[in-house]
Image (cartoon, coloured by chain):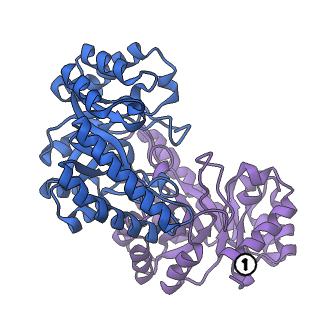
Chain colours: A purple, B blue
Amino acid sequence: MNDAARFAVHTATTKPWDLETAVRKYAEAGVAGISVWKEALEGHDAAKAGAMIRSAGLSAVSLVRGGFFPAALAAVRRERIRDNERLIRVASALGAPLIVLVCGADPKVRIADARAQVEAGIEVILPFAEAEGVSLAIEPLHPMYAGDRSVINTLAEANDLCERFGSPSLGVAVDVFHVWWDPALEAQIARAGRLGLIKAFHVCDWKTPVLDMLEDRGLMGEGCIDIPLIRGWVEAAGFNGFVEVEIFSRRFWAMDQDAWLRMILGALREHV
Amino acid sequence: MNDAARFAVHTATTKPWDLETAVRKYAEAGVAGISVWKEALEGHDAAKAGAMIRSAGLSAVSLVRGGFFPAALAAVRRERIRDNERLIRVASALGAPLIVLVCGADPKVRIADARAQVEAGIEVILPFAEAEGVSLAIEPLHPMYAGDRSVINTLAEANDLCERFGSPSLGVAVDVFHVWWDPALEAQIARAGRLGLIKAFHVCDWKTPVLDMLEDRGLMGEGCIDIPLIRGWVEAAGFNGFVEVEIFSRRFWAMDQDAWLRMILGALREHV
């Protein structure tokens, strides 16, 4: 892929850098978009951070991440709703048009009940997001996270949820790491396109073996995901927004981050 | 679950025991069925091993595991076919009515191509299995194994494959560890039942977090899978065969195996 105007990087990908450093380095390297990990905003005023991003010539792609709706206790679920409402205000102040939702899971809540709690949570926060002019993207997470991170595990489920709400402020985030294995992927990307739901596209790669379920993602090209094929499906479905690199990897975080950013840009050109 | 006549244990669950010890201990504990890991048969004559199992009063439930069809090189794929044919003869000699198929994956083969290679492999070995009177069960594996162990990752895909072949000797193995997250699970179990496909039912549990993708399965009751719910679906679909415990776990293998077997039997009664 050679359209650098569509390159974006998620700050968690270069976790050792603070927000200021990430903004400066991304801009110097010719990255066009930045997604901001909410932890990277700690200690920052969101409006000032947004101004810094824009003055560096970058676009704020999304604020990551809201969600985490399921919990055994109703009081905890209510607190999570308030967290999401706060995050929506932060996104608005930051000038990020999108919040990515990791919908959540609780091993003490039966999966069918947890899925209902996700839907109930979105129902509460969606009008709030609409009022603030912030969109929400349901990111289906790989089924290996169904026990403790998200009970929304296929693009079909995310599409179903969006279709039930029918709001232009609610869509999906397609991350190749989470969905590459799904035999229904091509059809569900096409469906998301027909419904106008694709709000974000994330890339990384799936190594074999995956040594850590959370922090061992691969750089594009070093794994087994056919990223150009999936990008083709996403674009055929009408998406032409940022291609966002989101790589959680202790291995790469341990590297010199300037060299790592060069590797990322090379991999975007060669393997996406 | 209190019907001990349906309790079965897979030898890999008590991996420190050799086959003779497992047979003796299972029989003493009142386990009714045994599935044999093919590695546990090494150095044994299959027919004699089968006679030993039967004379201890146990039923041989299945021989585990065939499959592993995808490979980048055609010569390797042919060798894998021969391995499966040998394994079918071993199952026949052992007196095991079933071989469980872990269909395979190769990170160097695109997933759609690998799925076609699985179908092509089954097409070759199925007549051989039919002739030997051995059934084959496609076990959909969790999507976290799509890169290197199996590209058949949902019960829907396994059912589709079986439906295309239409042979009474080809069915599915439902292992809660692999399929519990699937929002289509209830519907696909019902469909498998209508088609008469359910040939095996495996139980264990999904811990949070899973510390190792291969060897950190949980004992029933210590994780988040609603096993009684899934067992209910499987039985409503007409399955009344063995409930087979298959737990790969370094943690439990490190225990005294007599105590471990007692824990397994307790968990079968309490949490299945």
Q: Which of A64 and B208 is in front in this view?
A: B208
Residue A112 left/right relative to A86: left
Name the residue at 47% across, 70% down.
Answer: A170
Residue to which mark 1 is pinned: A269
Q: Quadrant of the C terminus of chain A?
A: bottom right
Q: Is residue A106 above or below residue A134?
A: above
Name the residue at 25% across, 59% down.
Answer: B126
Name the residue at 48% across, 68% down.
Answer: B74
Residue B117 left/right relative to A135: left
Residue A54 place in picture, x, y as percent:
79, 75
Q: Say what secondary structure mark 1 lies in.
A: helix
Q: In which quarter of the image is the N terminus of chain A?
A: bottom right
Residue B145 place in picture, x, y as percent:
48, 52
Quadrant in the rendering for residue A23: bottom right
Residue B116 place in picture, x, y as percent:
39, 70
Residue B138 visible from this viewpoint? yes
Residue B272 visible from this viewpoint? no
Q: Nearer the viewer, residue B89 or A138?
A: B89
Q: Is residue A90 above or below residue B83?
A: below
How many marks on residues?
1
> Type of residue at label 1?
Arg
Residue A230 left/right relative to A217: left
Mark 1 crowd level (few <14, some 14–19, many ≥20, 10 Å Cα): some
Residue A119 left/right relative to B210: left
Name the residue at 23% across, 68% down.
Answer: B164
Q: Is residue A26 above or below residue B131?
A: below
